[in-house]
Amino acid sequence: MKELYSIANANQDTSGKLKDFEGSYVSKYKQYMEQVVKIDMTDVKSEWDQIQRFNTLRNVFAHYPDHIVNELEKIEVIKEINNLLYERRDNGTLFYIDNKVILIDFLHTIKRFLRVVCIVQGVTQLNKNRVH
């Protein structure tokens, strides 16, 4: 998303910047692409939802050294990721990955998302914006 933002921002004649949006950086990038670049994300809703789940999981691995989460909302979001293993413990839920299937699934999700956003919509929309 950061690369998409960089490319789009370089091609925009607008004052809209990432800092103008609220939420996590991933959420800000999406808002920017929808509101400033005018990319319709409707066709990639399921991919976007999965990206959000993986972003939550990434934050667990980055910010919870023992990978144990005790926040119910995060636990429920992360548990929706296919092939992710988890174990309930007294102090929360431990998440872990023991094979590459989950990573391959995520790569396929990213590819589908980028194909629609960049190739199908993004290039067309960026070209329209350049003309105006």
Image (cartoon, rainbow, N blue to C red):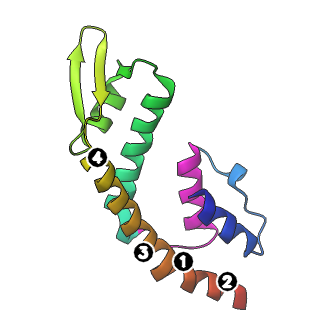
Residue that label 3 marks: 116
Residue that label 1 marks: 122
Q: Amino acid at mark 3?
A: Val
Where residue 115 appears, as percent x and y from the top left, is 42, 74
C-alpha distance separating marks 1 and 2: 10 Å
Sort mark 2 into few (<14), some (14-19) or many (20+) by Cα contacts within 10 Å: some
- Asked if 38 appears above or below 123 in the picture, the reply is above
Residue that label 2 marks: 129
Residue that label 4 marks: 100
Q: Secondary structure at mark 3?
A: helix
Which of pointers 3 and 2 indicates the residue nearer the eye?
A: 3
Q: Secondary structure at mark 1?
A: helix
| Towards the viewer: 80 or 115 | 115
Range covered by the magenta-colored residues: 24-41
Magenta: predominant secondary structure element?
Answer: helix
Q: Amino acid at mark 2?
A: Asn
| Dot placed on the residue nearer the N-terminal end, 3 or 2 | 3
C-alpha distance separating marks 3 and 2: 18 Å
Q: Are marks 1 and 3 in contact (CB under 8 Å)?
A: no
The circle drawn on residue 54 is: none
125 relative to 12 in the view: left or right? left
Instruction: Name the quarter where the C terminus is drawn.
Output: bottom right
Q: Secondary structure at mark 4?
A: loop
Q: Amino acid at mark 4?
A: Lys
- Asked if 115 appears above or below 91 in the picture, the reply is below
**Does residue 29 belong to the magenta stretch?**
yes
Instruction: Name the quarter where the N terminus is drawn.
Output: bottom right
